[in-house]
Image (cartoon, rainbow, N blue to C red):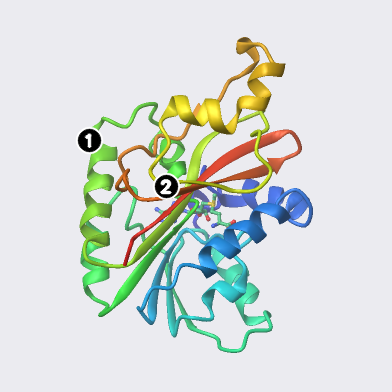
Amino acid sequence: MNTRAIMNPAGGLRYHLRALRFKNHEWKPFRWEIGEWLLAWQPKSPTLLLVGPSAGYCLQPFVFEKFERVICLEPDPVARFLFKRHLQQAPLDSRPTLEFIAEDHLVQYPERLPKLVDQYPNVCLLFTNVLGQLRALLNIDDNSGPAFLRIKAAIAEATSGRAWASFHDRVSGYVRPSFENSVTSNSRLKDGEVIELLYSGTLVTKSHRDIQLVDHLTEGLFPMDLPHTYFSWEIEPGRFHLIEAVKSPL
Ligand SMILES: C[S@@+](CC[C@H](N)C(=O)[O-])C[C@H]1O[C@@H](n2cnc3c(N)ncnc32)[C@H](O)[C@@H]1O
């Protein structure tokens, strides 16, 4: 068994254990909100390339009914087994065929990604909470280095002319975002706007020293001028990820 995939900093056993503890309570509101957002994404492609689904803890099975074929890029064998079961057991009207690719096409070998999508006619892409993990996967604290730029270029090439969507961590920390329901902006919020608009309630009640948000380095991965939607995900009690979601106009 591949221990690197099992201990993956973007998922792995630690993520499965967290999901076991928190998916039915803390994660539920986010799962429903992102499910609705994904339901409104209506690409014409019958084939989906799904990147980083894990076991689908945050992915409602009904999101996949619109596809005939789903190809998953997922290095974690436990995740692959559980995701297959997740979809097989769901009461769906129509069920896509499922395929899995374990080999990396994103982090170590991003140039493989555009080549892979070229193999499937009329494919669309969905990045499911994986791109905000590049910081951990590459062990970087800024996104100007060659490893990140290679990934950015590969994503741009793979998504060019295709329908795509991504939801990913924007920032995270022990600070509760100050909004109740998801917030949509006409374009990507700048850092100052994130603090002002999405954490404003918290900023007035806490001192600056307490407010430590980790930036997940997703700026520039997708066009900034598209509508962006923000969700609050309580990953464990008291710890929150601000999730940013964006989709192609196609
Ligand atoms: C935060 S989890 C995703 C959460 C998931 N979408 C859910 O619904 O709960 C990140 C996932 O990315 C996967 N991952 C890590 N490296 C990857 C890679 N190179 N290509 C594709 N997926 C990768 C991890 O195994 C993990 O399942």
Where disc 2 sits, the SS reads helix
Whichever of labels 2 and 1 marks the residue nearer the N terminus, that label is 2
Q: On the image, numbered disc 2 is attached to which residue?
A: 131
Residue 233, by quadrant, is: top right
Q: How far from the left and from the top, in percent, is residue 138?
A: 38, 37
Query: Residue at point 59% right, 39% down?
Result: 241
Q: How far from the left and from the top, in percent, is residue 45?
A: 35, 78
Query: Residue at point 59% right, 64% down?
Result: 36
Instruction: Classify residue 146 as left or right of residue 62.
Output: left
Residue 163 to residue 68: above or below:
above
Q: Nearer the viewer, mark 2 or mark 1?
A: 2
Q: Quadrant of the C terminus?
A: bottom left
Residue 205 to residue 136: above or below:
above
Instruction: Classify residue 137 as left or right of residue 230.
Output: left
Residue 58, by quadrant, is: bottom right
Residue 12 to residue 97: above or below:
above
C-alpha span from label 2 to label 1 = 16 Å
Q: How far from the left and from the top, in percent, is residue 190?
A: 40, 31
Mark 1: which amino acid?
Pro
Mark 2: which amino acid?
Leu
Where disc 1 sits, the SS reads helix
**Can residue 200 be seen in this snapshot?**
yes
| Residue at the farthest front position | 186
Dot 2 and dot 1 residues touching (CB under 8 Å): no
Q: Mark 2: few, some, or many residues within 10 Å (few <14, many ≥20)?
A: many
Q: How far from the left and from the top, in percent, is residue 234?
A: 68, 42
Q: On the image, numbered disc 1 is attached to which residue?
A: 146
The reply to whether the residue tagged 2 has its Cβ within 8 angstroms of ligand 1 is: no
| Residue at the farthest bottom position | 93
